[in-house]
């Protein structure tokens, strides 16, 4: 019995070979950093925690793709796999349409690239930008991935997100209306959110036309405003143990629409940046914990989903 909907399975069904994401840094910034929405960025954010060594904005898109392919081709059994260029760092629609056409046009012209995933904010898209991505999607796989982080406006303000939840709802509906796959990113355990609030996120997300969802535990990392806040006000923060988070994820899955595929359950910041929590688990090890807990509880994604 498949107890949750895995995005890996869905992605593989769309291609005739194994597909690997390559992270690309196109040198975009963020409206929450350059002053148009705010300064300093979201309180939890340090982009260095998820940027691979080959992924530097001083390199061309083509060079980053080539170096990414070289990195992953070290394993001979994956030599024939195809690649999806993942534009992850900062806000990858925050520029002129002409710049976007240049960046993404270069990526999809690469002979090994089968598609792109564009990470962005819901307040940084419009009909014109999404129409461009819809045109690319006629020939390549294109997913738009939005950082939502929370469905609570109080939390979004607290973490200096710079937009409300309705903004995310509107962007997701607009994207889906253009027949583009839509992904979302959520952080579970943000300060001020209790278990009921977190599980309420699953109910609200289930109402949206989402194709995929990434769940991440709250991580406190060096060089962030949140790390400073935690030093000054430690009573505001509670971090899950791996066992507690496993149960929370299972509870979340039970209430989540089974049509929404799960891309990942956890994130892994480099040890040199991570303050808390340090579980010492790789992604696949945590997946195993979730699958085991689902079996132990004889439950599945969507069991408590209210249509």
Image (tube, rainbow, N blue to C red):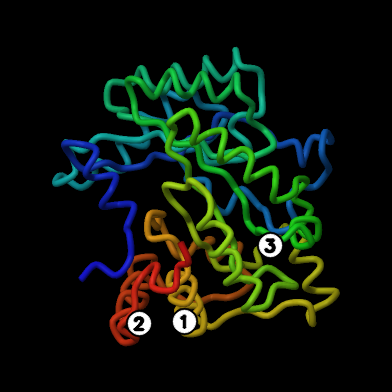
Residue located at (45% from left, 23% from top): 134
Q: Give the farthest residue toward the bottom.
A: 296
Q: Please provide percent x and percent y for residue 270.
A: 52, 61
Residue 239 shown left or right of residue 130 in the figure: right
Residue marked by disc 1: 247
Task: Measure how far apart labels 3 and 2 are at the Cα level.
Answer: 32 Å
Q: Please provide percent x and percent y for residue 63.
A: 42, 25
Task: Measure how far apart labels 1 and 3 are at the Cα level.
Answer: 27 Å
Label 2 Cα crowd, 10 Å radius (few <14 / some 14-19 / many 20+): some
Mark 2 touches mark 1? (CB < 8 Å) = yes
Q: Please provide percent x and percent y for residue 35.
A: 84, 36
Residue marked by disc 2: 293
Instruction: Identify the mark at residue 222; answer none if there is no mark.
Output: 3
Residue located at (32% from left, 28% from top): 113
Q: Secondary structure at mark 3?
A: loop
Quadrant where the image shows the N terminus: bottom left
Mark 1 touches mark 3? (CB < 8 Å) = no
- Of labels 2 and 1, earlier in sequence is 1
Q: Secondary structure at mark 2?
A: helix
Label 3 Cα crowd, 10 Å radius (few <14 / some 14-19 / many 20+): some
Query: 152 and 156: which one is in front?
Result: 152
Q: Which is more foreground, mark 3 or mark 2?
A: 2
């Amino acid at each position: 019995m498949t107890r949750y909907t895995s995005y890996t399975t869905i992605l593989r069904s769309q291609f005739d070979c194994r597909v690997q994401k390559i992270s690309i840094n196109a040198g975009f910034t963020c409206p929450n950093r350059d002053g148009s929405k705010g300064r300093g960025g979201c309180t939890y954010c340090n982009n260095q925690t998820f940027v691979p060594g080959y992924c530097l904005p001083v390199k061309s898109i083509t060079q980053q793709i080539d170096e990414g392919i070289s990195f992953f081709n070290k394993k001979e059994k994956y030599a024939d796999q195809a690649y999806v260029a993942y534009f992850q760092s900062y806000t990858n629609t925050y520029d002129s349409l002409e710049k976007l056409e240049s960046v993404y046009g270069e990526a999809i012209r690469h002979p090994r690239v089968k598609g792109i995933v564009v990470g962005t904010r819901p307040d940084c898209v419009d009909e014109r930008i999404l129409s461009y991505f819809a045109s690319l999607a006629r020939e390549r796989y294109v997913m738009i991935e939005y950082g939502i982080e929370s469905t609570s406006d109080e939390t979004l303000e607290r973490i200096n997100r710079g937009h409300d939840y309705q903004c995310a709802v509107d962007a997701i509906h607009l994207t889906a209306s253009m027949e583009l796959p839509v992904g979302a990113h959520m952080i579970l355990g943000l300060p001020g959110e209790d278990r009921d609030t977190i599980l309420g996120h699953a109910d609200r997300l289930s109402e949206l036309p989402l194709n995929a969802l990434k769940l991440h535990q709250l991580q406190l990392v060096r060089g962030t405003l949140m790390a400073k806040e935690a030093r000054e006000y430690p009573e505001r923060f509670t971090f899950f143990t791996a066992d507690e988070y496993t149960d929370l994820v299972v509870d979340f899955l039970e209430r989540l629409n089974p049509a929404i595929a799960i891309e990942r359950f956890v994130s892994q910041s480099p040890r040199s940046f991570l303050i808390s929590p340090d579980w010492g688990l790789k992604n696949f090890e945590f997946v195993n914990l979730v699958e085991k807990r689902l079996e132990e509880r004889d439950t599945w994604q969507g069991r408590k989903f209210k249509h």
